[in-house]
Amino acid sequence: MKLDGRLATAAKATACVLFVGHMAATCAQQIPERSALRPLAVPFEHYEELTGIWQSWNMFTTPPYLHDYDVEVEVIEPDGSQGAVGPILPGARRYDHTLRAESLFTCIVDDPTCLFYAGGYAVRMCSELRGRLGHGGQTIVVHEYYDRLRLLPDIRANGVIGAREDHRSKAFACGG
Amino acid sequence: MRRVIDFFWGPADPRSYALVRIGLSIAALANLIQLWPLRHEYFSASGMLTLDAARTTASGRLYGSIFYVVTSPAGVTAVFVVAAAAIIGLGAGVAMRLCAFVVWAWHVSYSDRAFPILHSWDALLRIGSLLVLVSPLGRVWSVAHVLRPRASDAENVPIYGLRLMRWQLFVVYITTLWLKLPDEYWRNGQVCAYFSVSIYSTTPNNTFFVRHEWISALQTYLSLAIEAAVPWLLWAKRTRALGFAAGGALHFAIAMTSILAVFSICMLPGYLSFLDGDDIERVRALARRPRARFGPI
């Protein structure tokens, strides 16, 4: 089917408006949150969500700060006895050292915007423990064990690359 | 207005679109292979990310995901298998528009279900698959063309899709440069040394770049220079080969020295969108030359 010449031009012109809008949406979301121009990004938000073009290019805008990273879940029984299980669900398996898992745990332990994910993770872990141990009532704490990178002169001085730190989530109480 | 229309609707070689389509397929498959062993951990009801948390985060937004309704381990596996089939179909050139839609829906779906585990390459794949979906698909290099060739397959197609893909690559590099430049470690040239002993390095216990910090400084400044220059080098026809060489070297180095190889692969479709018909002919001539040299006399 061939469109009449003027109709085709009008259709192309309309499409051009959409293309320019798409390019503007790509740029507008890069405007910093605190910029006075940030309101320019608002009209594009639903378009970005619907099409999946939401984006952020802040990868490695600062240097990485961890040399080693591990995660464990501390389990405190109602009688006060303690143990530890792996954090990966299903199965409470050992930390798998994948990029995805590192992103998840830094998010649920360190990032307030992941509050709901942290709560949901705790519910799942409690359910896993209940299934495995046959009872509930535990308190769980997610531990991030990491070697934080030392400054370059310090590494050169004695060859020790990272300083060990234990970073813990808030405690989550499993129901009975 | 005529100039704007020509800018977006001018002619493009369909093989450029075919290359982007195949490049996206390779990148998407690499990513899916990486996600496959993790599928139950992040997408099923027995995994670590509850659906309630995803829905609460998405509340009031126009996010959508097949994983909002498919939550059983078997269902999640089935979605992965369908996505893999569509990705392969897209690359091979079978039922391309349908495959392109499924590939776009797949990328949006897993992203919208698992926000906390996302990385920059997930955005590259989401955006790339949308642009491939709305663009000419380059039937000229496809199984469909081999089976049922059409005279129109080799005809020029509108360039708008390539324009949008190139624009996206510009935004990636310019934005990341904008964000990196104020950082004191980038300015001091120490980032590569820190990176080399970080969890992202393939050799985190090797302190070579820490002990030879001047090499790290050269690497750091060179990577900034490449990020600043690559979009412009790719844009200009005369410097395009240099842009490919510089960007290729940067991403090859990232792939070889870090655990982020999939990121480098996901940059591929954006680069390929800059190739026009002349470039493709030049590459084909280069590829033919050794064969001619070593062929029968």
Image (cartoon, rainbow, N blue to C red):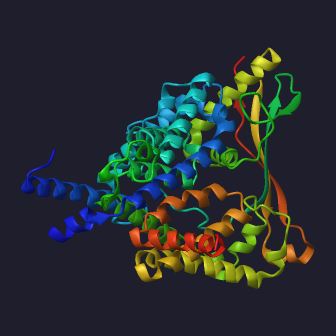
Dividing the picture into quadrants, the one containing residue A81 is top right
Left or right: B270, with A99 as reference point = left
Vertical position of residue A22 compared to residue A87: above or below: below
Which residue shows up at 30% across the image and 52% down it? B151
Closer to the camera, A166 or A9? Answer: A9
Task: Return the x and y of residue B176 as percentages of the image width and height.
Answer: 52, 68
Dividing the picture into quadrants, the one containing residue B263 is bottom right
Task: Return the x and y of residue B85 as percentages of the image width and height.
Answer: 54, 36
Vertical position of residue A125 compared to residue A44: above or below: above
Vertical position of residue B125 compared to residue B182: above or below: above
Closer to the camera, B283 or B182? Answer: B283
Which residue shows up at 49% across the image and 65% down it? B271
Left or right: A126, with B102 as reference point = right
Task: Return the x and y of residue A106 as percentages of the image width and height.
Answer: 67, 48
Q: Quadrant of the N terminus of chain A?
A: top left
Residue B181, visible in the rendered structure:
no
Dividing the picture into quadrants, the one containing residue B48 is top right
